[in-house]
Amino acid sequence: DMLMRRHVVRIGHDSAIWARHRVIAEIIATELGRTGQIKELLHGLAHVAATQVTPTLARSARAWRLLRLVINHDFLIRVIGADAARNLYGELEGLLRWDYHFWLQRGSLEVEVGDLTLAENFLNQARGLEPTDSFIETEYSYLLLRKAIESSTASVAPELVREATESLNSLIERVGEHDVYPYHVLGSQGLAWARRGITSSLEKDRFIRGIIFQIEDGCRNHPRSVELKRL
């Protein structure tokens, strides 16, 4: 009864008791995070996966799937924090310096919570290895908008915004039907730029109307996206 109240198990139509494995995994992950053991675990998993992947190994292979999970910047920030994630990336660099996805995740972490100069360096590494990847293009546009927002009075800021918004609009045309992220970056960072970087009410109105047009299109393509509805 206690396990059912915690939604760890459920009763099936045949009256059998079924374990809810995802819930069990979440409980274990929470406890490992509380005790600090999850850092050691993730370091071990990341090193194992990094030693098994190669440039010729199919990206659908199990080792790649594991690696993508344990080096995902959002996941690492949430589970072990930004500083521990930086340490992990540093340890893996010797094994993964040839992989564009490694540099993308490392750069994305710095875009979110860190040093934008480092972020640009890491994302340029990713762009050099895979120049046409849409995820890298989106993250680089995110970086340009962050740079403009943080230096909103600099003369170069409007040009950074122009370059980023043109890139994001192009990405939306190419991949917007199946990728919500360009819409989200354009909407969230565009609104932040409008608040901090545009003083003219007419210019602000024109800029925000352009963002609204794209976000409405994003809501039609991705009706389940809570983030776009909030924007």
Image: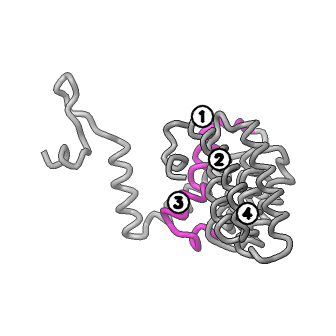
The residue that mark 3 highlights is 42
**Residue toward you, 109 or 42:** 109
Left or right of 56, for residue 20: left
85 is within the stretch colored magenta: yes
Q: Which mark is residue 110?
A: none
Distance between the alpha carbons at the discs numbered 2 and 3: 31 Å
Going from N to C along the chain, the mark reached first, 2 or 3, is: 3
Q: Amino acid at mark 2?
A: Tyr
What is the residue that sits farthest to the left in this orientation? 1
Distance between the alpha carbons at the discs numbered 4 and 1: 24 Å
The residue that mark 2 highlights is 183
Disc 3 vs disc 4: Cβ atoms closer than 8 Å? no
Could you tell me if residue 87 is visible in this image? no
Percent coordinates x, y for residue 41 in the rendering:
49, 60
Give the residue at x 50% y 62%.
78
Disc 1 vs disc 2: Cβ atoms closer than 8 Å? yes
Q: Quadrant of the N terminus?
A: top left
| Residue segment shown in magenta | 57-86
Element assignment for label 1: helix
Element assignment for label 4: helix
What is the residue that sits farthest to the top in this orientation? 14
